[in-house]
Image (cartoon, rainbow, N blue to C red):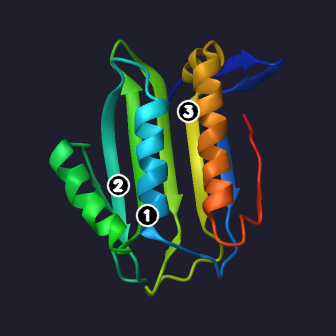
Amino acid sequence: MEPPQTLYKQSATHFALPLYLRKETEVNGRLIADLAEMFLSTLLFPGTQLTGLWTKRAGMRAKLNMGEFTSSRWKAAQKKILNNEYAVVDIQAQTPDFPNQKIWFTAHVNPIDRDEFLTSGMWKVACSVSYLRHIAASPERVEALLQLVRSAWNGTPGGPAYGYGNL
């Protein structure tokens, strides 16, 4: 965990931008895949290494599958995502030279036609304060972050219940 840093006169370790979904909202796997690809292609700086891929099938008895991010695991996950099999997808990355600089994307949703009924689902992009400083220094990355959140908001059937950014 990154030690707290001062940002806007407050101590913070990370930035999070969650969007909370209504409990009856079902999300098509295509949207999860599209948002994950947008995250991978626009918010990772050169040299940033993908470190974790966590997935969970829909259903109360399903177990969280936690492991390293590899291209073969990602390809297998993409097929299951597009088939509406996953309720949770979490992708984590970090900068190798500065391991406290981290960013991650999370989808925790009710997939279409599956047995998963959450109190509320969530889209979330989060990062360490040090990674956020790099994003803030790049107008293209700031726009990419905002576009990812807009795409999640606009792509969610009925829109999220609410969302906010916080340190």
Q: Name the residue under label 2.
A: 54
Q: Where is residue 105 in the image (x, y as percent from the top left)?
A: 49, 45
In the visual, does 62 lie left or right of 71? Answer: right
Q: Residue at x 20, y 43 (%)?
A: 70
Name the residue at the left extreme: 72
Q: Name the residue under label 3.
A: 127
Q: Position of residue 103 (x, y in %)?
A: 49, 33
Quarter of the image with the C terminus in it = top right
In the visual, does 37 lie left or right of 52? Answer: right
Q: Nearer the viewer, mark 1 or mark 3?
A: 1
Q: Name the residue under label 1.
A: 30
Q: Where is residue 34 in the image (x, y as percent from the top left)?
A: 45, 53
Q: Which of marks 2 and 1 is in front?
A: 1
**Distance from Cα at disc 1 to Cα at disc 3:** 24 Å
Q: Which residue is drawn at 56% across and 32% down?
A: 127
**Distance from Cα at disc 2 to Cα at disc 3:** 17 Å
In the image, 125 versus 36, the foreground residue is 36
Earlier-in-chain disc, 2 versus 1: 1
- Secondary structure beneath label 3: strand
- Secondary structure beneath label 1: helix
In the visual, does 7 lie left or right of 82? Answer: right
In the image, 47 versus 7, the foreground residue is 47
Q: Give amino acid for label 3.
A: Cys
Q: Give amino acid for label 2.
A: Trp
